[in-house]
Amino acid sequence: MTISHPAPSSAALSPALSPPARPEPDARAWSTPRRSLRRVTRTLAVGALAATMGMAASPTLAQASPERSPSPVPAVTGDAPVSLRRFVEQRPSWTDCDHKELDEAGARCATIRVPLDYRHPEGRTLTIGFSRIKATDTRNRIGLMMHNSGGPGGITLDMPLLDAPAMGKELAARYDLIGMDPRGVGRSSPLRCGTSGHWLRSAGYDTEGFRAQARYEADLVKSCQRKYGKDLSYLGHFTTRNTARDMDLLRAVLGERKTSYFGISYGTYLGTVYAKMFPSRVDRLLLDSAIDPAQWYVAGFRDATAANEAYLDTWAAWAARRHDTYGLGESAAKVRATVEGIALQAARTPFKVGPYTADGQQVPQALAMTMADDREFARTAETARVLHDAARGRTVEPTETLRAALGPPDDESEVQNSLQMALQCADRAAPRDLPWYRNNVERSRATAPLFGPLFNGVHPCAFWPSEPLEPPVTSGNDVPGLIVQATGDTRTSYANGQGLHQKMPNSRLITLKAQVHGVYALYPNRCVDQQVNDYLRTGELPARDTVCEKDPADAVGR
């Protein structure tokens, strides 16, 4: 990879220049954050699927892209450049959030300006929007807790609403809970490439399917070029490193010397990058459903294929016991054959699903979107049932999942898709050799005909016109942190959690024996919750790594 410019400053920003925060009301009404839960769940189902299933390993690329530590520069102090100090000295203007649940919880929202390019802070700026639910237990206040819901491209503004049900009101009341939309989404200068659909598509069953997928990915990049210019230089600044810099700038603006952090899925990579760049600024670090930084993102997630196959096997056995309800087959083998037959038929002869058309590129994606939580087997079965009926020529009404997979993107999905492409391509260069992708796809079909071509297909970054400005963060750090990982995670595989744990020697790993992506605050488990909450309360990690069983009442496929 060609590095075009020296790395910008990664030094932590001093809070000494920050004015005192304006007083906020203490009243806080906690309610079940259903909309926030749906949004985070959708981000994990779609965003994480796309982020972790793009490509197979590329040893030559990994060797060509060594990691380089950010250049050391002085911290922002009284003699710092005025052009940078002006960002630290911002005073947020707090307002209602114009978000029912956040407003009911007593949150206030604001925006700050950040440099588009931290190498040239005097240049163009971006808006960063964020929410804050202030600590009400001021006597026992711990400090800030920032969040990221994954994706990349997930809206995070309302993610703090998940905290109180998971932590308990007393512990949540000791934190200032911050929901910062990362640059490029939500209230933070959202990107809109005008794409026709999500970039993640299967390469299908034959050469023509591969070619069709490659054309589709190339067209997505052209859509971005029509909006943002041929070289896409503007999008080159929407990176994980710069998002981490935005976080640290916000920390300084809020007058804090440290921040705690809770990230899910891609949010674990962002947290790892932040800890690598600003280790002295990290308090508690909670990384749930983790990404091994060496695997982000081009190095691939071929190990996710095995997790998805295992999930499909477990689900197929569940569905076979309910053949009278779903009609997919009376044995697990017959259910699998039905599902694989649906995808093959869609590849040969696309069929109508309500107002939409399902083809061989979309059906595997639609099924995989449902496969992230072993409590939701019925959702997978209903999606498969509708597709099965449609494939047989019956008139059907698409499920919510099928609308998302087959229909045009809504505004939130369009923004997430645009940011996801831009960030991945700006974070790390991708192989541009199409035969390399084709060979990976063909090899994968032998053992995983349904999902192999989905996980190994062409990525839009193969057609991206520019190289990353900085190297990716591929190693860990010495910051203490708590990693939570499920054994059957179909998005960020268990091996990813183990890999990050090995790269963070001062971390602890909590393993949950379940097939789920996103555990804490999303998949309640007494064993996990107790250890996480003890850590968030005291700052002390568990004495050793722990394995947690599923709660007895948490039946699979309920």
Image: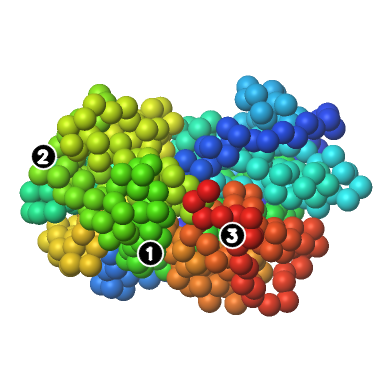
**Marking on residue 349:** 2
Give the residue type that dot 1 points to: Ala
- 46 left or right, relative to 177: left
What residue did someone put label 1 on? 310
> Along the polypeptide, which appears first: circle 2 or circle 3?
3
**Marking on residue 287:** 3
Give the residue type that dot 3 points to: Leu
- Which element type, helix, strand or loop, lies under badge 3? strand
Residue 125 or 238: which is nearer the viewer?
Answer: 238
Give the residue type that dot 2 points to: Thr
> Along the polypeptide, which appears first: circle 1 or circle 3?
3
Residue, far left: 208
Quadrant of residue 408 within the rendered picture: top left
Q: At 23% across and 55% down in the image, what residue appears?
A: 337
* Residue 375 spot, x, y in % from top left: 51, 50
- 432 left or right, relative to 383: left
* Residue 291 spot, x, y in % from top left: 47, 62
| Cα–Cα span, label 2 and label 3 | 43 Å
Q: At 48% across and 54% down in the image, what residue appears?
A: 374
Q: Quadrant of the N terminus?
A: bottom left
Between circles 2 and 3, the one closer to the viewer is 2
